[in-house]
Amino acid sequence: MTKMFSLGLRPFRGLLALLALALMLAAPAAIAQDAAEDGPALAPEITDTASDIDIFTLRLIPLTKDELAAAAEAWLGIVRDKTEAVIEAQIRLADAEGEAADAARTALAELTTGRKALFDKYATVIDSWEKKGGDEAAIAEYRAYRSAIIVEETRTADAETLMTQALTWASDKDGGIQLVIDVSIILVSLLALYIVARTVRRLVGRWIGRVPNLSRLLQSFLVMVAYWITMAIGLMVVLSGLGIDISPVFALIGGASFILAFALQSTLGNLASGLMIMLNRPFDEGDYVDVGGVAGTVKSVSIMSTTLVTPDNQIIVVPNSNVWGNTITNVTTSPTRRVDLVFGIGYDDSIEAAQKVLEEIVAAHPLVMSEPAPVIRVHELADSSVNFICRPWVKGGDYWTVYWDLMRQVKQNFDAAGISIPYPQQDVHMHQAAPKTAPAERAAPPSTVSGGAGTASDQARGADGA
């Protein structure tokens, strides 16, 4: 019977061998599929609670999104077990008294400090998972778990326990000591950054000073830009070196810039006007200008405003949009200026004598330029005087000196020559008409002159009425 059975199966031996081989190959695949459904395998270093945080952070870099999800789940179990130990220590503290309570409180503080290091790695895993596109809802749940534990434990702890925990954290090398080290690094880095930025500003200022045809305003602006760019780049390098993620800062700036563009329209207008002033150079520092009805010497020009100093030493700050949007009169941009003066003489005085006096005064002044030649001419037959124009040319810095000197000297020399300088006056001529004797006619009231002044036409109308 057995022999017959074996003979009957002989044709199927090849098929049975192939089936056995298929089962052997499918078994590892099924096992791997089950393992994949349970989650990717993690290296022991990823769940090592005693590893350094910096080394741990580097080990997370090659992990994929799924591997980080598994790591987050593993670390959730680690911090959960540690939190259970912390809660048990709190319960023992609540039941202890005296020295036992002090010992329990110290043990609780040590457990809390140790768990903080675990929470730091737990948060590092979640942050890395989020950067690689992890599930936002799951990430929010993981973070909410940590926040809820810290809040509840702080709320239920007494003041003495909190003080003990704070002192323990302050003396821990990964707690307060590390914070002091980080703050010291930040302060030293900022000081070094400030020194570097000042050095860059000084070097850029020297280099720009050698570039021709650049105004002092544009030079100051470029030096300021170089300074702040150095500060910004250095600050980002310092923060990155301390492990602070600065990518949210760029996202915040990008989102806020659109809103600020509408909220700060006038400020942006001043900014654009400041750039136009620096590029077109209608004036420079030290020039005396008249802008928007305000006159003074330009003290400084920032990207937002122009600062002027008036002759009586008042400081006036004018927004750049008002400067660029109005007529700009630059008084000192030309090396020479013309002094425009007007002198009047009486109608009874000699024009030739007055002309000679003015020419002698102008020719004798040491600050008056011979070229262009001064102009002295009879300009107007006014109501009360014959007016001369006197227009000598001087250097820009001598304008007011010559102006005041000529005013004084003309008055003195006219007086010495017997030439009068009349002031505005008006002559009133009174005409008395002969009275009429007809009885039927009514006499007009006498005309009066208010304040001792009147006109001949007024008097004529009064006489006709009489």
Image: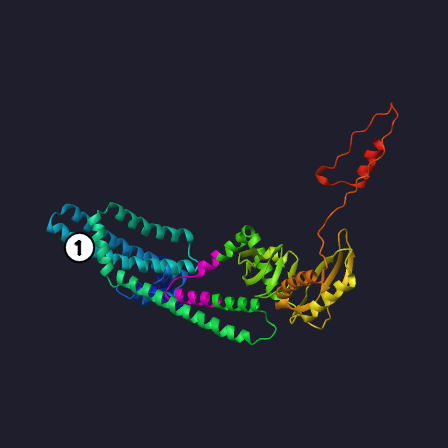
Asked if residue 251 is among those painted magenta in the image, a careful observer would answer yes
Residue 286 pos. (x, y %): 57, 66
Q: Could you tell me residue 408's position as x and y percent?
A: 64, 62
Residue type at tag 1: Thr
Number of dots carrying numbers: 1
288 displayed left or right of 24: right
Q: Residue furthest right?
A: 438
Magenta-highlighted residues: 229-252
Q: Residue at x 39, y 70 (%)?
A: 192
The quarter of the picture where the C terminus appears is: top right
Q: Quadrant location of the N terminus?
A: bottom left
Is 236 or 8 nearer to us in this picture?
236
Among the 4 quarters of the image, the one containing residue 35? bottom left
Q: Residue at x 11, y 51 (%)?
A: 99
Q: Is residue 318 left or right of residue 203?
A: right
Residue 378, image x and y in percent? 78, 61
On whether residue 247 falls in the magenta region, the answer is yes
Type of colouring:
rainbow
In the picture of the structure, the residue carrying the numbered disc 1 is 106
**Residue 71: image x %, image y %?**
34, 60
The answer to whether residue 90 is above or below residue 290 is above
The residue at the far top in this view is 440
Describe the element under mark 1 as helix, strand or loop.
helix
Crowd class of label 1 (few under 14; some 14 to 19; many from 20; radius 10 Å): some
Q: Nearer the viewer, residue 450 or 240?
A: 450
**Residue plotted at (83% across, 37% down):** 460
Relative placement, left or right, of 395 versus 108 is right
Magenta span dominant secondary structure? helix
Q: Is residue 139 something one can see in this rendering?
A: yes
User: Would you place residue 59 above or below residue 82 in this image?
Assistant: below
